[in-house]
């Protein structure tokens, strides 16, 4: 449990000094510039802006007087309007060559520093460089900052980096200002809405009670209250151990809103909520409404489960078939959804698409129970070769007497006396009770099923467990490769076998061979994603960074795998750039990596030294100081010492 909650910290805020009565010199600088340039429309707009901010503001009498400007900064202001900071530096340098004693006015320097800060924070936010946002914010004070959107950027950065104390302090500074510095209601509402992401519902509600000082603001906070209900319902749905539901008064408001607005996220939330509460009829209604808006895998799963919970198995099975491609991403769910067709004798024959999907799901999960179900399905259909393969596979994954019995019966029906004898010799002492039953068992009757039950990968392993999959599972990588190579020589190596061959070569450090095997499996839709992932890893281990990036760009991976591969790509690029003294490229690569995964200390050191070599000692010092605060490290301490020396 957090030791400090938002409301407790907020209550400790003290009164702040009142806001200045009028604009300072920095704010007036633009007014003088527009007057000097005779840009009357810009002058009028700036005047209106200042009057909105300072109701008693009067335009200075000398605004058009030549004495109002002590130096010609017209070019600088023009470049300022374009955010051309390089051009500004060049112009300042040119002026100093002409007049060494000259320096920009305090008005311009102050306004330029703020504009640079905004540009840097906005750019860092866009690329999700959260440490960059914090560093660019510098001494920005949430309790007095007038440009509130800058503080909102800082809130995002604190939230993403886990800086809880700083995050809470920033919220306190925004929400609990007093007097003239109190935020307008619209900004309070936006800030409260953001807080629902960062704090518990209880903490946010306590803060809401403190800031909602008017009926108008209380009414405006109703959407925030609804967001908190959504958060509470989502938390209940996600917590498997939690059984106490959300207060019905809260949920009733969400139900009414969902009925009225039909927001997809609300329909889905309520569907899973009612399903967990064992109200499948209500859940079915929500999921059906959600699917009417958009075809979606998760809502289809909820719809299937709602129907199954009502024992409407045929309707549930129809949903599984309709979403068979989407459910393939979750083979465990797909197996259970399709197994009805294979586990009960009163069911119609499964079609080719269903058999293939079920088979692939079984192989991807190595599920012995479902392999056994499919094996008996094939056996009773008098497809004895397929039955032999699937019984062998289920036995390879998990031994059981019924699986040995099924394999033995399949061998008998095929007339494979030698293999039957070897199987009996191996298992007679393990399962002695099954052999008498096997010898008197009657062959299945009825017509052979029209759809063949095939093994998508190579033939099942022999009863002794000596196939390539058995070798792979036992980490006998050399033997695994030898078996698959023999299959290749016969022209019988499947895409699945080539995928396994790639992993074996990779485990043995044979990078070129691994790459070749993985690329051979890229042409099959079922193995393509795994093959692309394996090929990318092989390329990265060989430091072929660009080739690895091309691979994952051509063959998209899952979100988790893509993040893993790209993080390694950016790390290799950062290391290479540092070795070649290309320090700006180092920072670009590290920033890209930090948008994907957390940055460890060794990479932060690389960041600090890159800033140092680029001459940005302030940034370098900030990085090394942060490292030194969390964990003393001689390298970080040395970096801090060097970057602090002028």
Image (tube, helix red, strand yellow):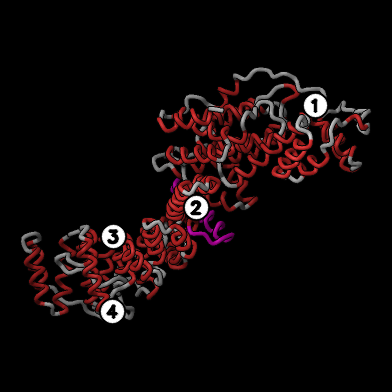
Identify the residue at horizontal 61%, vertical 46% (top origin): 126
Figure quadrant of the C terminus: top right
Residues marked 1 and 4 touching at CB (< 8 Å) = no
In the image, which is nearer the foreground, mark 3 or mark 2?
3
Q: Is residue 274 visible?
A: no
- Main secondary structure along the magenta-highlighted residues: helix
Q: What residue is shown with label 3?
A: 367
Viewer-proximal residue among 362 and 401: 362
Position of 80 relative to 166 (above/below): below
Q: What residue is shown with label 2?
A: 283
Q: What residue is shown with label 1?
A: 24
In the rendered image, residue 121 lying in the magenta stretch gets the answer no
Magenta stretch bounds = 274-297
In the rendered view, does 366 fall on the left or right side of 565?
A: left
Q: Measuring from the top left, give residue 53's x and y in whole percent.
A: 81, 31
In the image, which is nearer the foreground, mark 3 or mark 4?
4
Q: Measuring from the top left, give residue 554's x and y in whole percent.
A: 48, 65
Residues marked 4 and 2 touching at CB (< 8 Å) = no
Q: Earlier in the sequence, mark 4 or mark 2?
A: 2
């Amino acid at each position: 449990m957090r030791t400090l909650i938002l409301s407790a910290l907020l209550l400790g805020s003290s009164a702040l000094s009142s806001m200045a009565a009028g604009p300072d010199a920095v704010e007036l600088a633009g007014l003088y510039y527009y007057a000097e340039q005779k840009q009357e429309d810009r002058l009028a707009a700036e005047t209106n802006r200042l009057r909105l901010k300072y109701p008693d503001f009067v335009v200075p009498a000398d605004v058009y007087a030549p004495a109002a400007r002590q130096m010609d900064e017209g070019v600088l202001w023009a470049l300022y309007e374009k955010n051309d900071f390089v051009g500004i530096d060049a112009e300042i340098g040119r002026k100093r060559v002409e007049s060494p004693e000259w320096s920009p006015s305090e008005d311009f320097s102050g306004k330029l520093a703020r504009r640079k800060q905004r540009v840097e924070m906005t750019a860092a936010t866009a690329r999700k460089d959260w440490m960059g946002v914090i560093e660019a914010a510098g001494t920005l004070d949430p309790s007095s900052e007038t440009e509130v959107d800058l503080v909102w950027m800082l809130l995002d950065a604190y939230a993403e980096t886990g800086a809880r104390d700083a995050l809470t302090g920033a919220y306190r500074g925004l929400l609990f200002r007093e007097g003239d510095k109190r935020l307008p209601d619209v900004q309070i509402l936006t800030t409260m809405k953001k807080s629902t992401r960062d704090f518990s519902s209880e903490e946010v509600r306590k803060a809401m009670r403190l800031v909602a000082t008017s009926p108008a603001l209380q009414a405006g906070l109703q959407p925030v209250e609804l967001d908190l209900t959504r958060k509470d319902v989502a938390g209940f749905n996600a917590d498997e151990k939690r059984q106490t539901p959300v207060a019905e008064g809260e949920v009733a408001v969400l139900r009414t809103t969902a009925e009225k607005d039909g927001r997809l996220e609300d329909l889905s939330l309520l569907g899973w909520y009612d399903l967990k509460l064992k109200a499948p009829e209500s859940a079915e209604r929500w999921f059906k409404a959600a699917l009417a808006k958009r075809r979606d895998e998760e809502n289809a799963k909820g719809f299937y489960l709602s129907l199954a919970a009502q024992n409407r198995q045929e309707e549930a099975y129809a949903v599984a078939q309709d979403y068979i491609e989407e459910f393939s991403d979750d083979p465990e769910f797909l197996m259970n959804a399709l197994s009805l067709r294979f586990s009960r004798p009163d069911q119609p024959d499964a079609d080719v698409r269903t058999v293939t999907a079920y088979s692939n799901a079984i192989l991807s999960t190595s599920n012995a129970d479902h392999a056994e179900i499919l094996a008996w399905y094939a056996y009773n259909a008098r497809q004895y070769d397929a039955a032999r393969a699937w019984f062998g596979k289920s036995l390879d994954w998990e031994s059981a007497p019924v699986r040995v019995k099924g394999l033995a019966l399949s061998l008998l029906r095929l007339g494979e006396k030698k293999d039957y004898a070897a199987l009996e010799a191996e298992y007679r002492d393990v399962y002695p009770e099954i052999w008498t039953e096997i010898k008197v068992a009657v062959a299945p009757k009825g017509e052979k099923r029209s759809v063949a039950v095939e093994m998508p990968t190579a033939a099942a392993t022999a009863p002794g467990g000596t196939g390539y999959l058995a070798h792979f599972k036992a980490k006998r990588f050399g033997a695994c490769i030898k078996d698959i190579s023999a299959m290749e020589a016969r022209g019988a190596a499947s895409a699945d076998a080539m995928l396994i061959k790639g992993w074996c070569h990779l485990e043995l450090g044979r990078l070129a061979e691994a790459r070749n095997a993985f690329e051979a499996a890229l042409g099959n839709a079922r193995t393509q994603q795994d093959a692309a992932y394996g090929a990318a890893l092989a390329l990265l281990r060989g430091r072929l960074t660009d080739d690895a990036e091309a691979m994952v760009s051509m063959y998209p991976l899952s979100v988790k795998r893509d993040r893993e591969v790209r993080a390694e790509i950016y790390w290799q690029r950062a290391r290479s750039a540092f070795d070649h003294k290309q320090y700006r490229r180092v920072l670009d690569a590290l920033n890209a990596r930090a948008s994907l995964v957390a940055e460890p200390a060794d990479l932060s050191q690389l960041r600090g030294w890159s800033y140092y070599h680029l001459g940005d000692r302030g940034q370098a010092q900030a990085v090394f100081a942060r490292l030194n605060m969390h964990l003393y490290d001689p390298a970080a301490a040395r970096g801090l010492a060097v970057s602090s020396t002028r």
